[in-house]
Amino acid sequence: MDAGIGLLAAAAAVRRLRPDADLVLSSDPDGMPWGPRTPQDLTTRALTVAEAAVAHRPDALIVACNTASVHALPALRARLEPDLPVIGTVPAIKPAAAGGGPVVVWATPATTGSPYQRRLIEEFAAGARVVEVPCPGLSDAVECADEAAIGRTVAAAAERTPGEASAVVLGCTHYELVAERIRAALRRPGQPPIALHGTADAVAAQALRRLGKRPAPEAPAEGTLTVLLSGHEAALPAAALAYEEGRLLQAVGPACREAVPER
């Protein structure tokens, strides 16, 4: 679940680990963006999006959104666990800081400087210097697959990224969809590439661990796909197909199941 197509990266990561998994993608295009909303309003919308997915009786729920994980994760877990494991998304500050820094965290303006992110830095940065870089407009540009806006916002964030940085944490799931654009913008002549740290692979692996399942990338590609847009079944949004992850998921067969009663 996510407000928009930021969930594609985690869903594609699950798909690569378990081609036989049935996937339900639940998002909230009617309520986007979530970032400017109050924590209470965001939590209400996140619970609604989660309940739409729960009606399809999933084995686990991945909250593939940093902002929702910041504000709504406790409420989601209180509502759904222990019956349904809920896996949140935490910026990969700890592995990024393992190299000693300096580390840069790209995030939305709502997350940058938040007490939540500051606590993560204090807890996991291991003394490395961490610079927070807000990226206004980048998640919106990715959501719309606006190539020109993506180029402008990535370039602006790259200009604010210290040249001595050794790693960049992608603190918004949308950013992982344009990781190669970001990597190219951060390329420094004569210097090694800056390491990018996303969350999709780690979140997918954690979901499987919570379910006691092993990765099986060689499994037959028999999984299905259900897309819920503000609670209604639909096709993947056109913008999703601008990204490799969206095209991978589009190749998954649609779910053909009888209606199931809500929990």
Image (tube, rainbow, N blue to C red):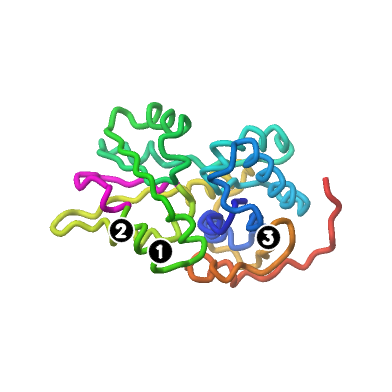
Instruction: Using the numbered discs, state the Cα–Cα distance from disc 3 to disc 1 in whole angstroms.
Output: 24 Å
Residue 228 seen: yes
Contact between marks 3 and 1 (CB within 8 A): the answer is no
Coordinates of residue 231 in the picture (x, y in percent): 73, 56
Point out which mark residue 229 bears.
3
Q: What residue appears at the point 80 percent right and 64 percent down from the top-left corner?
A: 257
Q: Is residue 254 above or below residue 75?
A: below
Image quarter of the C terminus: top right
Instruction: Using the numbered discs, state the Cα–Cα distance from disc 2 to disc 1 in whole angstroms.
Output: 10 Å
Point out which mark residue 155 bears.
2
- Residues packed near mark 1 inside 10 Å, few (<14), some (14 to 19) or many (20 plus): some
Horizontal side of 255 relative to 189 (left or right) equals right
Q: What residue appears at the point 55 percent right and 53 percent down from the top-left corner?
A: 215
Q: Quadrant of residue 40?
A: top right
Q: Is residue 136 above or below residue 253?
A: above
Instruction: Using the numbered discs, state the Cα–Cα distance from disc 3 to disc 2 in whole angstroms.
Output: 31 Å
Identify which amino acid the numbered label 3 is placed on.
Answer: Leu
Coordinates of residue 29 in the picture (x, y in percent): 63, 58
Point out which mark residue 149 bears.
1
Identify which amino acid the numbered label 2 is placed on.
Answer: Ala
- Magenta span has 173? no
Horizontal side of 46 relative to 189 (left or right) equals right
Q: Quadrant of residue 162?
A: top left
Identify which amino acid the numbered label 1 is placed on.
Answer: Ala
- Residues packed near mark 3 inside 10 Å, few (<14), some (14 to 19) or many (20 plus): many
Q: What residue appears at the point 72 percent right and 52 percent down from the top-left corner?
A: 53
Magenta residue span: 157-171
